[in-house]
Amino acid sequence: MSIHPETSAITAGRPEVAPDASLNPPIVFSSTYHAGGPVGYGRYGNESWSALEAAISELEGGQTLSFSSGMAAISAVFSILPIGAPVVASNQGYSGTMSLLNQHHATGRLEVRFVDITNTEEVVAAIKGAALLWLESPTNPCLDVADLPALIAAAKKQTIGVGVDNTFATPMVQTPLSMGADIVMHSVTKFLAGHSDVVLGSLSISDSALFKRLEESRRLNGSIPGPFEAWLALRGIRTFPVRFRAAEANAKTLVTRLQKHAKVTKVRYPGFGAVISFEIDGNAENAEKVCESSRLITHATSLGGVESLWERRRRWAAESPSVPEQLIRLSVGCEHVDDIWQDIEQALASL
């Protein structure tokens, strides 16, 4: 039976039904397993990871591996590429990914070609001879959108691997594996877990042979999740669709109001999701002052939680220089939209 993601989020990763069986999976704290079974050792598997992975697999498709962080998941993908392999990626994406790719390029570990992912012709030209196309759509923090179907099709036509960071859009908006991508990455920390209390990542993979290679990378690098964190993330997934839709509705209302505000010069929003980036009429110092003046919105880095968060992204040295100094990224939460707006208005009034 085909079911909707709202249902999958609630039903997936449950124990088998039996009289007096628990509705929820247990938290399994064990490093050691009796010989003869499929797990073998605590670095190779855990029932709490498996339940989380089953739930994400239901949402994204394919087979899923959970990792100790989103960066651990991303690093695993790059780790299985040959030395010097060409990789094409966004020139304005998540700063952690860009920093890692810049490091790999500088050392000769990979040959990295940064592109404007909104320019389909530029991307298609750049992928010639590449080993991997790494896509992020929408991008972090400028919320640029790639033509995923076209780019994935172009890459697969040349037998080039495709990975997609789906953290911002989530499977509520798009499922890249169904478009032909090989790998979908999530910072589970963000919308999936949704309560700002865990750091986890995941990879959902369409091919069993590729899954085995990435599973081996996780084993050898030791980038495994903790069972308690996995349990918390699974608990968060149960309400993920409801939280995402509520935050998205708030975001759409706020976009309309921000576009009319005299002290906002540009609003970036792709039309979906719960993240808005906007530029103020001022400089970096002014943008910092706005973020520091909030009373409800938390001034912090991260996104996807039930609470609204914002920050000036260029405060981070690793952020792309293409990101405007006065840009504020707002992760919209599930508070009442009028309360969020009232806080934005009083913060902007501080200018």
Image: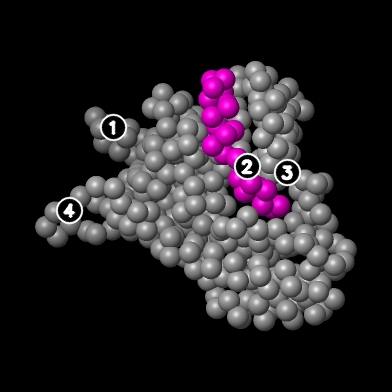
Please say if the residues under marks 1 and 3 sit with CB atoms less than 8 Å apart. Answer: no
Mark pair 4, 1: CA separation = 22 Å
Q: CA distance from mark 1 to mark 2?
A: 40 Å
Q: For numbered disc 3, what is the local secondary structure? A: loop
Dots 4, 2 in contact, CB < 8 A: no
Classify 10 Å Cα crowding around label 3: few (below 14), some (14-19), many (20 and above). many
Residue 92 x %, y %: 73, 43
Instruction: Say which of 78 and 34 sits in front.
Output: 78
Q: Which residue is mark 2?
A: 146
Q: Quadrant of residue 258?
A: bottom right
On residue 232, the disc is none
Amino acid on which the number 3 mark rests in the picture: Gln
Kindly identify which numbered label has been placed on residue 92: 3
Dot 2 amino acid type: Ala
Would residue 20 be found to the left or right of residue 104 on screen?
Answer: left
Q: Is residue 16 above or below residue 309?
A: above
When asked about the image quadrant of residue 110, the answer is top right
Labels 1 and 2 touching (C-beta < 8 A): no
The kind of residue tagged 1 is Pro
Question: Which residue was labeled with disc 4?
Answer: 17
| Mark 2 vs 3: CB contact within 8 A | no
- Which residue is the site of mark 1? 38
First in residue order: circle 2 vs circle 3: 3
Element marked by disc 2: loop
Residue 311 forms part of the magenta stretch: no
Q: Residue at x 72, y 68 (%)?
A: 259
Q: Amino acid at mark 4?
A: Val
Q: Secondary structure at mark 4?
A: loop
The nearer-to-camera label among 4 and 1 is 4
